[in-house]
Amino acid sequence: MTQDTVGTSTTSTGDGGGAQGSAPGAVPRETDAPDVTFSAEHLPGGALAALEAVLMVADEPIPAVQLATALGLPQREVEDLLGELAAEYRGELGGRPRGFDLRQAGGGWRIYSAPVFADVVGRFLLEGQSARLTQAALETLAVVAYRQPVTRGQISAVRGVNVDGVVRTLTTRGLVAEVGQDPSTGAVLYGTTGYFLERMGFSSLDELPALAPHLPDVDSIVDAADRTLGASGGGSDRAQPRPPALPDDARPSTNDEGTS
């Protein structure tokens, strides 16, 4: 690991000397210049530990120049630190090999699980996938299955609760997926997946069981509504719902259709 510190000058070695800041190429100097207002070297564990802390929260590959900016160190030093960490994780510096790798991919650096443990990691993830769904997840999945394509707002309207977290869970498990956007609102539409059909043992959505046998009888709904209205003291005319008034432009015309 190099010994450059934040307080030292940015004189380059092997460039044949010259005044500082007069060397050609502004971009390399910007990436190599340390931030004099911050030093990761003074943190517990030094720059290596600070670099690990940043990499642990990265959800995508991070370029070395971005890591150098975060640590307040020259880019070249950060690249040396990245190589040292990668060798350490592989067990090349005398320690045991770790269960994770530090690899350069996608234009940056990121920590990944080591390929040799792919079977173990896969078994763990599959066990999580096979866990039983909660009642809330089952209800949400049923709404998606019977109303698809459907937005999260429409699902919430049916269930009466916020379903953002449950939809994310179902999406993560591969049971539902984004299938488009609502043309009027732009909201994401969700539908079931082929994996859902596989888990249910269906070959198509046509095999979903009919909902009618599981719903209350229509006559019982009307009777319950009549009892409720009657109990409110409104009389017989209150028990018979009136059709809603139509706006003027929606009322039938007295002229015959086709005439102007």
Image (tube, rainbow, N blue to C red):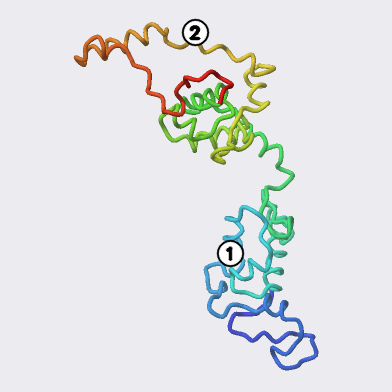
Of the pair 226 and 188, the residue shown nearer to us: 226
Q: Badge 1: few (under 14), some or many (20 or more) residues near its Cα, within 10 Å? A: some
Amino acid type, residue under disc 1 in the picture = Ala
Q: Which amino acid type is shown beneath numbered disc 2?
A: Pro
Residue 108 appears in the picture as rendered: yes
Distance, label 1 to label 2, CA atoms, is 62 Å
Q: Residue furthest bottom?
A: 19
* Residue 124 seen in render: no
Taking depth in this image into account, of 249 and 92 the one nearest to the observer is: 249
| Mark linked to residue 49 | 1
Q: Residues within 10 Å of mark 2 (few under 14, many from 20)?
A: few
Indicate the secondary structure of the residue bearing disc 1: helix
According to the picture, the residue beneath numbered tag 2 turns out to be 213
From the viewer's perspective, is 46 left or right of 247?
right
Residue 157's place in the image compared with 15, above or below, is above
- Does residue 184 lie above or below 247 as drawn? below
